[in-house]
Image: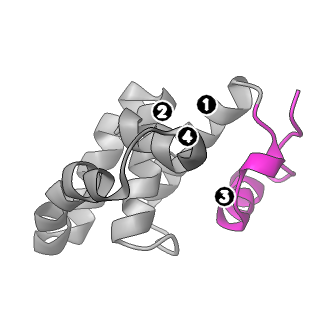
Amino acid sequence: MAEFGHFEFSPMDSMLDGSYVWQHLQAPYLEAKNSDEEKFIIDIAAVAVQAGGWAAYGAHRTVASLVGPGTDHPDYIRTVMTALYFLRDEGYGSDRLNDFEQAIWWQVEGDAFPRSR
């Protein structure tokens, strides 16, 4: 998950090929997602929230990619927030978030995501 998190956050800085990313970092999760989407979200959140960091960001982006960013499953929101707290703590600002991430932050925190340090 961390490898996918790094790739999604900064693809231009990544040395990963798009076909590798799909084949090795996304496609392996399709069966779990297709067999039971809710269980997929719950299971990925359990690992991501505990791991934190780039793994949480990768998990957030995996669910967004395979399920869709519009899911409002509480465990997905928890995964997103774990990823966003990590980015905030690392000094990344609102300019690095997409509109969906900023909306989730606002919904949970009640204010705007901080600017870069």
Q: Report the front residue among 21 and 72.
A: 21
Q: Mark 2 or mark 4, which is nearer the start of the sequence? A: 2
Q: Position of residue 35 (x, y in %)?
A: 10, 71
Tell me if residue 57 can be seen: no
Q: CA distance from mark 2 to mark 1?
A: 8 Å
Looking at the rendered image, the quarter that the C terminus falls into is top right
Q: Residue at x 38, y 36 (%)?
A: 3
Question: Between marks 3 and 4, how big is the CA–CA gap?
Answer: 10 Å
Dot label at residue 54: 2
Q: Amino acid at mark 1?
A: Phe
- 10 Å neighbourhood of mark 4: few (<14), some, or many (≥20)? many
Lateral position of residue 59 relative to residue 82, left or right: left
The x and y percentages for residue 96 are 74, 48
Disc 3 secondary structure class:
helix
* Label pair 2/1, CB-CB below 8 angstroms: yes
Residue depth check, mark 2 versus mark 1: number of the one nearer the observer: 2
Left-right relation of 113 to 61: right
Judged from the image, the secondary structure of the residue bearing numbered disc 4 is: helix
Instruction: Assess whether mark 4 and mark 1 are in contact (beta carbons under 8 angstroms).
Output: yes
Instruction: State the CA–CA distance, disc 1 to disc 4.
Output: 5 Å
State whether residue 70 appears in this view.
yes
* Residue 102 % position (x, y): 74, 58
Find the magenta span and give its range: 92-117
The earlier-in-sequence mark between 3 and 1 is 1
For marks 2 and 3 on the same chain, the one whose residue lies earlier in the sequence: 2
> Disc 2 versus disc 3: distance between alpha carbons?
15 Å
Report which residue position mark 4 lands on.
83
Q: Residue at x 18, y 66 (%)?
A: 30
Contact check, label 2 and label 3, Cβ < 8 Å: no
Residue marked by disc 3: 101
Of the numbered discs in the image, which one, if any, rests on residue 86? 1
Give the residue at x 71% y 53%.
97
